[in-house]
Amino acid sequence: QVQLVESGGGSVQAGGSLRLSCAAFGYISRNYCMGWFRQAPGKEREGVASINRDGTTRYADSVKGRFTISKDNAKNTLYLQMNSLKPEDTAMYYCAAQPVQCLATGLSQYEYNDWGRGTQVTVSS
């Protein structure tokens, strides 16, 4: 059974950093398109970053230059390094996976089959 488990969320001040992790169980993540999404209260879920099977990465404009997505295939773990955090980054962050290559940017939630339960990130000003 496929399972994704996020960790690493927390509360930080603006300008701080966090690294989110997503452990994948039940399949080999290197064969998958994987992504990070976030959802703030009252807002739609939005794509933050994606990484394709070949290692190609894509980012939402709002996080370019601040966030970095990466994957450790040996550990079957996806990461999101978040630097220069802003209050508007506050949201529940989810990782997602699909067993094919990313379609277009990989930033559409509708591409993905499997989701974790999320980890909360809170950035105070």
Image (spheres, helix red, strand yellow):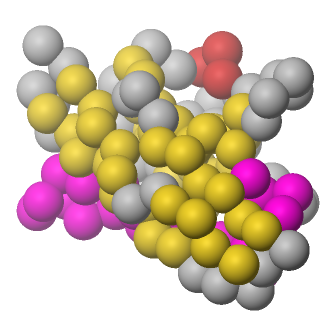
- Asked whether 72 or 115 is in front, the reply is 115
Determine whether 64 is above or below 106 in the image. Answer: below
Q: How many dots with numbers?
A: 0
Q: Which residues are magenta?
A: 65-90
Q: Quadrant of the N terminus?
A: top left
Left or right of 12? Residue 101 is: left
Res. 59 in view: no
- Asked whether 125 or 115 is in front, the reply is 125
Identify the residue at horizontal 22%, vertical 25% (top origin). Answer: 3
Left or right of 57? Residue 99 is: left
Res. 118 in view: yes
Q: x%, y% of residue 115?
A: 43, 23
Left or right of 25? Residue 36 is: right
Residue 16, picture quadrant: bottom right
Q: Quadrant of the C terminus?
A: bottom right
Q: x%, y% of residue 56?
A: 55, 60
Residue 46, picture quadrant: top right
Q: x%, y% of residue 104?
A: 71, 36
Residue 79, picture quadrant: bottom left
Q: x%, y% of residue 21?
A: 35, 57
Determine whether 51 is above or below 85 in the image. Answer: above
Determine whether 98 is above or below 58 in the image. Answer: above
Identify the residue at horizontal 55%, vertical 46% (top origin). Answer: 120
Residue 83 painted magenta: yes
Residue 46 painted magenta: no
Left or right of 91? Residue 121 is: left
Identify the residue at horizontal 78%, vertical 79% (top origin). Answer: 14
